[in-house]
Image (tube, grey):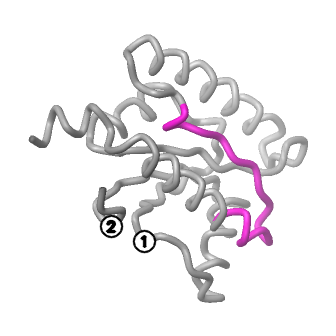
Amino acid sequence: MDLNDTKIVAFACTYCAYNAADLAGSTRMQYPPNVRIVKLLCTGKIEPILLLEAFRHGADAVFVAGCMEGECHFLQGNLRARQVVEYTKKLLEEAGIDPGRLEMFNMSASMAQKFVEAVKTMTERVREHGPSPLRRATNP
């Protein structure tokens, strides 16, 4: 599988994870270019349908990146996001899709390396499992 063809969607909170991604880019850290970042005010606004729609539209893997636990700018948004991710993983498993294609990561704005590692982790998972079965079904 050509990893340049893989699609990874990252839902990132404005205050921490998005800034970590921005810092990674501005300091020219190297990571796979296959990630598309969706900026959210808070990961607490994530819903299972958003995660599932990302897969339906061709994502091979999806991750949610929020503030460090206990440090959410909106108090408990990242804790809610973790619950949503765990629930959605169960839905994926019931649908016959590897739940490892979805993950939650926590990072602060200064943790650019953690963002890079998250992208690399998800890229490696796609490498191991191949393209999403949904992607293959919609794009023969």
In the drawing, does residue 113 fall left or right of residue 9? right
Which residue lies at the image location 39% right of the left edge and 29% below the top edge?
52
Can you give x and y, in whole percent of width and height, for residue 104 in the image? Answer: 65, 41
Magenta span contains residue 44: no
Which residue lies at the image location 54% right of the left edge and 73% below the top edge?
31
* CB contact under 8 Å: marks 2 and 1: yes
Q: Could you say which is closer to the camera, residue 118 or residue 81?
A: 118
Q: Could you say which is closer to the camera, residue 138 or residue 45?
A: 138
Asked if residue 100 is positioned above or below residue 10 in the image, the reply reads above
Can you give x and y, in whole percent of width and height, for residue 55 in the image? Answer: 35, 36
Quarter that holds the C terminus: top left
Label 2 neighbour load within 10 Å: few <14, some 14-19, many 20+: few
Q: Which residue is mark 1?
A: 33
Name the image quarter holding residue 89: top right
Which residue lies at the image location 26% right of the left edge and 41% below the top edge?
57
For discs 2 and 1, the disc positioned in front in the rendered view? 2
In the drawing, does residue 27 fall left or right of residue 56? right
Q: CA distance from mark 2 to mark 1?
A: 7 Å
The segment highlighted magenta reads 100-115
Check the image and name the residue furthest to the bottom.
27
What type is the residue that disc 2 sits on?
A: Asn
Instruction: Report helix, strand or loop for mark 2.
Output: helix
Magenta span contains residue 109: yes
Q: Which residue is mark 2?
A: 4
Asked if residue 120 is positioned above or below residue 54 in the image, the reply reads below
Can you give x and y, in whole percent of width and height, for residue 86 in the image? Answer: 63, 24
Can you give x and y, in whole percent of width and height, for residue 40 in the image? Answer: 56, 50
